[in-house]
Image (tube, rainbow, N blue to C red):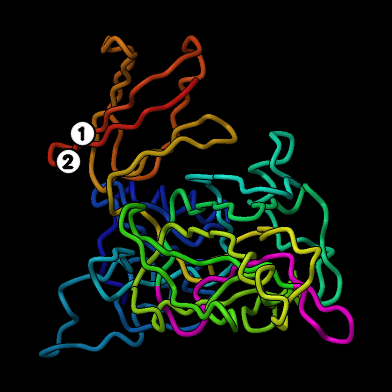
Amino acid sequence: MNMSKISIEIQQLHDEACTRGDEQYVDPDTGYTVLTRLAHERRGECCGNACRHCPYDWKNVRSRGGRLFSFVVLCMLALSTHTILAQQERTLCDTVAAFVPGSGQHTGQGATFFPRNVFTGPAPTARGDVPSTDPREICSLGLGGSITVGLRTRVIVDREGTDLTIFENAFFYNGGRVFAEPARIELSKDGFSWIKIPFDSLTLSGLAGLSPTLDPEASNPTTCGGTALDLAAIGIDSVRWIRLTDVTRYILNNPASQFYDPTLSGFDLDVVVAWHTVSRAFELHAEQDPMTGLTHIGSPSDVDVRVYDVSAQLLITKQLPAGVHTIDIGDLAPGCYFIVLNDGITMRTLKVQV
């Protein structure tokens, strides 16, 4: 028998999530993400962890001293523990933190397509021997260009196998040669400290942009192509930001390279796909969506939100419960504003543009 005690509020949140078909919802008291009945039914059996919404009456939960454990596992998604249950499906990068175009190629850089073209994909027409030149699907960095992409409300975490895949516009031609436009890869948890992936400037091993897209619709990271990364092999347990910097000149400056082609013009980013992610509800954060102008706020506890103009005049104040929220200040006059978050322990400030 499921021994967990569920309040009316929690049950309502759970039922609403199930109605939407969601496998998770945020607990309003803790800010942790909890698995719904749907997630357990799709698992197919009791996992033995005394989950809050277990539909199997805790069949596999072991007893201690003839009684069920007194604790109830909420299946909490927090990076501070080692019991993370990761989402195991495609999660596409959905935010650009920085973009510095290089020289030469500029496809897909204009406001008409960018940054939406790096939030979709992989390009549906791309195959091992078929490149994509559609600016709606790719953004050319240009020679020496750099881009930093990431996730707004989720974090990529280490699980068995491939954790993220970088899709570029590489393809096979002339009997199996690879049209490669490589980029250096750097990973970061916070956007300040970076881990550089080692690479060989002659063989290009360790760089992105060498592996063609094989099957853009594949749900298995081992068959879709692209540059696959396993965080365990890199020595990092989680990632939120991915920085890619074009280094195609390593090829252009070496005519003896197996990848040499005088028409190379720089790395073309299609999309970065994360395969294992968890919610960011465990940390206080705020970000403005560059596409919509909306601000996304996440907090593990109740948070005070205040909006100031550049003269420090308080314009808006809100009290938000734990969880992930979206606020819209688009009704304010065009200009620069500061959003200040305070949960009583930590304070965060975000500068936004309306």
Residue linked to disc 1: 342
Label 1: which secondary element:
strand
Q: Is residue 92 left or right of residue 37?
A: right
Between 179 and 16, the one lying in front of the other is 179
Q: Position of residue 185 (x, y in %)?
A: 50, 67
Q: Is residue 348 left or right of residue 334?
A: left
Q: Is residue 162 left or right of residue 271?
A: left
Q: Quadrant of residue 1?
A: bottom left
Residue shown at 60% from the left, 75% from the top: 227
Instruction: Give the crowd class for mark 2: few <14, some 14-19, many >=20 residues within 10 Å.
Output: few
Residues drawn in magenta: 158-179
Q: Are marks 1 and 2 in contact (CB under 8 Å)?
A: yes
Between 200 and 151, the one lying in front of the other is 200
- What is the three-letter code of the residue carrying label 1? Asn
Residue linked to disc 2: 346
Q: Position of residue 97 (x, y in %)?
A: 47, 45
Label 2: which secondary element:
loop
Q: Quadrant of residue 342?
A: top left
Between 166 and 300, the one lying in front of the other is 166
Residue 101 bears which disc, if any? none
Between 270 and 9, the one lying in front of the other is 270
- What is the three-letter code of the residue carrying label 2? Thr
Does 349 sit above or below residue 54? Answer: above
Residue shown at 17% from the left, 41% from the top: 346
Q: Position of residue 40 (x, y in %)?
A: 46, 73
Residue shown at 23% from the left, 38% from the top: 302
Residue shown at 50% from the left, 20% from the top: 354
